[in-house]
Image (cartoon, grey):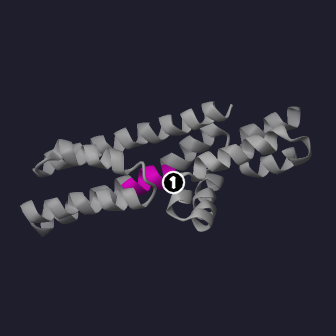
Amino acid sequence: NVADKIRSFLVVITQLNVVLAVINWIACISLGIPFAFLLSFLVFFLNYIPTIGAIVASLLVVAIALVTHGWGVAIAMAVVQGLSGVLIGSVLQPKMLGSRLGLSPLMVLLSLVVWGYLLGIAGMFFAVPLTIIVKIVLDSTDDLRSLSVLLGDAASAREMEKR
């Protein structure tokens, strides 16, 4: 069960990173930014690191746009990076992770804050897998099962009622 949830987490993150890389590649090609494939490859891998990876990837792409084409293209690329990052990181990712893993989207976001506070950057990187493990432990312990509902989405709450 834990392995399946972690696998689902990695699949969702990989899918979203592919989308971000493709958006980046299209924007780089459209704006004439060199090294489009390499930059998109970096965007893909750096976005596995929550928050900081996206910032580093965006700054790198915008810096190359600035050096090669000036402020206009750099600003356009910053807008693309910002909009795609917000849409995917703040809207799609919590929804997809929540539905695939049985966590509410709010809990996905809160887990980043809590684990980040407790364990720093490593906590942010492992926030969702750690929260999944906590939820599975709560689900499998009769006395604590009711607490699991707080972490879960509506579907997992209905499933819990059936037990």
* Label 1 Cα crowd, 10 Å radius (few <14 / some 14-19 / many 20+): some
- Main secondary structure found in the magenta portion: helix
- Image coordinates of residue 97 in percent, x first then y, are 57, 43
117 relative position to 92: left or right: right
Q: Is residue 134 left or right of residue 95?
A: right
Q: How many marks?
A: 1
Compare residues 116 and 23 and report the one nearer the observer: 116
Residue 6 falls in image quadrant: top right
Quadrant into which the N terminus falls:
top right
Residue at x 43% of width, y 49% of height: 88
The local secondary structure at tag 1 comes to helix
Residue 68 spot, x, y in % from top left: 7, 60
User: Could you tell me if residue 104 is visible in this image?
Assistant: no
Q: Which corner quadrant holds the C terminus?
A: top right
Q: Position of residue 104 (x, y in %)?
A: 66, 48
Three-letter amino acid code of the residue under disc 1: Phe
Depth check, front residue: 115 or 73: 115
**Residue at 67% over, 40% down:** 102
Per the image, is 11 magenta?
no
Q: Relative to residue 137, is residue 11 depicted above or below?
A: above
The image quarter containing residue 145 is top right
User: Which residues are the magenta region?
Assistant: 85-91
Please name the residue shown 23% across and 60% down the image.
60
Residue at 56% x, 45% y: name it. Answer: 95
Task: Judge from the rendering whether residue 97 lies leftward or rightward of residue 152; answer left or right.
Answer: left
In front here: 159 or 119?
119
Picture layout, residue 18 above or below residue 113:
above
Residue under label 1 = 125
Q: Report if residue 125 is visible in the image.
A: yes
